[in-house]
Image (tube, rainbow, N blue to C red):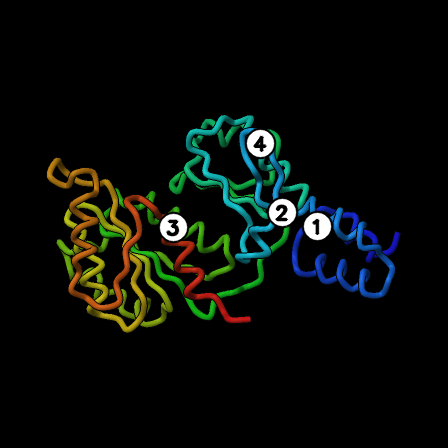
Amino acid sequence: MSESEKVYRSNIVNETTLKDLLMRFKSGELSYHAVLDKLKAMPFEDLGFACVDHHRGLRQGTPEVIFAQGKTTEQILSIMKRMVDHGDNVLITRLSKEKAQEIKKSYPDATYYEKARAMTLILEQVEGRGRGTILVMSAGTSDIPVAEEAAVTARFMGNEVETVYDVGVAGLHRILAHGDKLDRASVIVVVAGMEGALPSVVGGLVDKPVIAVPTSVGYGASFEGIAALLGMLNSCASGVVVVNIDNGFGAGYAASLINRVAV
């Protein structure tokens, strides 16, 4: 079997396979119906409980991500199998340690990040896509799980990531000690609970986008992250944008898109 035939017969969906498919149709090697049959199988796969989007990587540059919360281990494994069959790298978020241990039995090469509650399975190394470094900061130690989710996501998408943790506004000198990292970063993700003040401070120090992530960390009047969310939305620092409460994944994904080199 030729390399071209291998590409066509595989289930992998990317620019290379589509280009090969169209070139073979153009040359007359493949019929209209053969191409149509292949394209019909590419967009998504209905598993009954989930529709796996095999075109996500083609449209957005990153495969679909599995949100584990609320899914059984069997459902996660079924989705993973379809993604692996299509040659996709896999990122699973909000994954418990217990489910991760079960998944590792089927995919021993997968890596579980306990702090981030995330797992990755890399079938093909992602080439560096970032034009610079993404810096992930947390106000407190209790905010680290959300910050780690952002960091794992950004690395999964092919970025160089640095982290600085426990530098909240109760001790501003701790932020200033990392001026070199602030200067070096292209995008900064700032994770904070309590009153959510750290993104405003960082936003006033740098000339780059700051993605603020409110966390549900805090005492009663923090209202499980609502206080931090409102504080960040009302930031007086220009260039600060805000994602949802505890949404480290969303922040890491957005930072990666901002940092991505245009092609």
* Residue occupied by mark 1: 39
For the residues labelled 2 and 3, the Cα–Cα distance comes to 23 Å
Q: Residue at x 34, y 49 (%)?
A: 147
Q: Amino acid at mark 3?
A: Gly
Q: Position of residue 242 (x, y in %)?
A: 28, 55
In this view, 21 is above or below 116: below
For the residues labelled 2 and 1, the Cα–Cα distance comes to 7 Å
- If you read the primary sequence from the N terminus, does the residue marked by circle 2 or circle 4 appear first? 2
Asked whether, in this view, residue 4 is left or right of residue 47, the answer is right
Q: Position of residue 142 (x, y in %)?
A: 25, 42
* Residue occupied by mark 4: 77
- If you read the primary sequence from the N terminus, does the residue marked by circle 1 or circle 4 appear first? 1
Is label 4 in contact with label 3 (beta carbons under 8 Å)?
A: no
Give the quarter of the figure containing the C terminus. bottom right
Q: Residue at x 27, y 65 (%)?
A: 178
Q: Which mark is residue 250?
A: 3
Q: Residue furthest front?
A: 32
Name the front one of labels 2 and 3: 2
Say what secondary structure mark 2 lies in: loop
* Residue occupied by mark 2: 43
- If you read the primary sequence from the N terminus, does the residue marked by circle 1 or circle 3 appear first? 1
For the residues labelled 4 and 3, the Cα–Cα distance comes to 23 Å
For the residues labelled 1 and 4, the Cα–Cα distance comes to 25 Å
Is label 2 in contact with label 1 (beta carbons under 8 Å)?
A: yes
Query: Which of the two residues, 3 or 181, is positioned nearer the viewer here?
Result: 3
Q: Residue at x 20, y 57 (%)?
A: 198
Name the front one of labels 2 and 4: 2
Q: Amino acid at mark 2?
A: Pro
Name the front one of labels 1 and 3: 1
In this view, 20 is above or below 118: below
Q: Position of residue 164 (x, y in %)?
A: 31, 56
Q: Amino acid at mark 4?
A: Leu
